[in-house]
Image: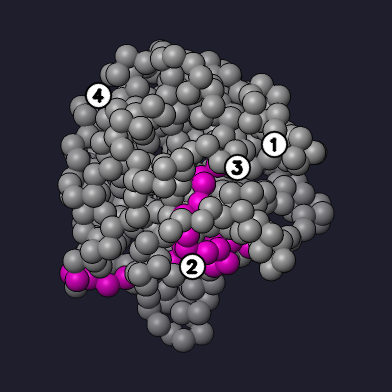
Amino acid sequence: MSKEVPYKIYLEEKDIPSSWYNVRSDMKQKPAPLLNPGTGKPMTAEELGMVFCDELVKQELDDTSAYIEIPQEIRDFYKMYRPSPLVRAYCLEKKLGTPAKIYYKFEGNNTSGSHKLNSAIAQAYYAKKQGLKGVTTETGAGQWGTALSMACAYFEMDCKVYMVKVSYEQKPFRREVMRTYGASVTPSPSDTTEIGRKILADHPGTTGSLGCAISEAVEVATHNEGYRYVLGSVLNQVLLHQSVIGLEAKAALDKYDVKPDIIIGCAGGGSNLGGLISPFMGQKLRGEADYRIIAVEPASCPSFTRGVFAYDFCDTGMICPLAKMYTLGCDYIPAPNHAGGLRFHGMSSTLSQLYHDGYMEATTVKQTEVFEAAEYFARVEGILPAPESAHAIRVAIDEAKKCKETGEEKTILFGLTGTGYFDMVAYEKFNDGVMTDYIPTDEELEEARKKLPRID
C-alpha cells in the first residue's frame, strides 16, 4: 500500500545525484554521429575540440558509459538549489475534479529561473578547468543565457551571449539579469559577425531564431583565442547533465512507492524533456518498466510532429556539424511568438532516435491554449510558469481531464522547467486578447526543407 504523499517531497542534500545518467548507454539503436559538413564523415574528437571544451567532447561522444561522475565542485554548486522539490498538485487535482494523481518537478527555485543552470555550471566548470578565457553561446527566452552568465560569474570567466532578437526586445529584464552577472548580450542576428550580416541581408527585418544566434556564437568562439562555444540544449552532453532532474524525480517518487503512468515534458531542443525522462526511459529500454512519455512542442515550431528525420545543420549559418534529428530545416525561422526556448528548428539526436524507434510520442499545442493553461495553473497552484513549461501543463491538464471522463486513476508526472516572471509581455498580450496562434503551412515547411543537405 502506498504511503501518504505530502504536498512537496523534499530529498536531502545527500540525495543529490553523484553521477549523471547517460541514457544512450541503454539504447540499442544509438543516435547517429555528428558529421563534418565538409567531408560528410563523423566528427572526430579533435575536430569537435575546436568548438567545444575537451571534456565536454568526451561526454558528447560517449555512447557506452551508463554513469559519469559529477565533479565535487559541481555538486557543491548544486547544493545551492538542489535537490529541487517534487510537488503533488493536490490543488490542481481538486479543481479539475479528476481521479488522476498529478506531480511536477519544479526547476525554477534558482535565480536563473529554470533547469538550465544544471548544465551551465558543468560547462563553465570544464571551460575553467581547461584554462579558457571565456565562452560564447546563444539564448532564446533568455533562461540559458541567464544560467550561463551566473555560472561564468562563479568561475570568473567571460561570457558572450547572442540573444534571439525577438526575445531580446520582449524580455529586457532577462537581458539585464545577464548583464548584472557580467555577460555581454547582443541581439541576433547582428552586424557584429560575418554570418549575422549575411542572415540580415538574406532575411531583412527578421526577428531571429536560435539557429541564427548559434551561428553567430560559434563564429565568435572560433575566431577568438581562448574561447569555446557552449550550448544549452540539443547536444548529448546537455541531456546528460540534465539527468539530475529525472534522477531526483524518480528518487522522490520511489520514496513513496509511486510509479507514474504518463510523463510529460515540453520540447524545444530537448534538454528539459531529456533530463526528466532519462532514468524512466532507461527502465523502458531495459524492459524493467513501461511508461507513456509525451513530448509537447509549440504548433508554430513542430519539429517532431511535422519535421523529417534527417541530417541537418544545427544553425542557420550552416557552419556547425550536421546532426541527424527531426528537423524543420535550418532555414526555418518561427513566427515571433512567445514559445521562447522552444523555437529551435530541430530536436536532440538522442530524443529523435528514441521518438523514431517508438519509445515516446509527441503532440503540439497552440500558443493561446498554452497561456490559458498557464494562467489556470498559476491561479490554482500559485506558481507563475514559464511559457515553455506551460506547454507541458496544457497536456497534463488535458490528460487529467481524460481520466475524469474515463474514471481511470492514472499518475501523471510533468516537468515545470521554470518561472515566467520575465515573460510578462506575453501574459499581457494574452490578457489583452491580442495574442494570436500561428501554425506554419505545409508549403512553408516544404520550402525550408528544400535546403536540407544531401547525405549519401
The mark closer to the camera, 2 or 4, is 2
Residue 56 or 456: which is nearer the viewer? 456
Q: Which residues are magenta?
A: 287-316
Q: Position of residue 254 (x, y in %)?
A: 22, 59
Q: Which residue is mark 3?
A: 316
Q: Earlier in the sequence, mark 2 or mark 3?
A: 3
Q: How would you rate the neighbour count of disc 4 (Cα within 10 Å): few for under 14, some for 14-19, many for 20 or more?
A: few
List the single residue furthest toward the bottom: 406
Left or right: residue 225 compared with residue 189: left
Q: Which residue is mark 2?
A: 362
The mark closer to the camera, 1 or 4, is 1
State yes or no: discs 2 and 4 in contact (Cβ < 8 Å): no
Q: Secondary structure at mark 1?
A: helix
Q: Secondary structure at mark 3?
A: loop
Q: Which residue is mark 1?
A: 199
Quarter of the picture containing the N terminus is: bottom left
Q: Secondary structure at mark 4?
A: helix
Q: Residue at the location (23% across, 64% down)? A: 28
Can you see residue 410? yes
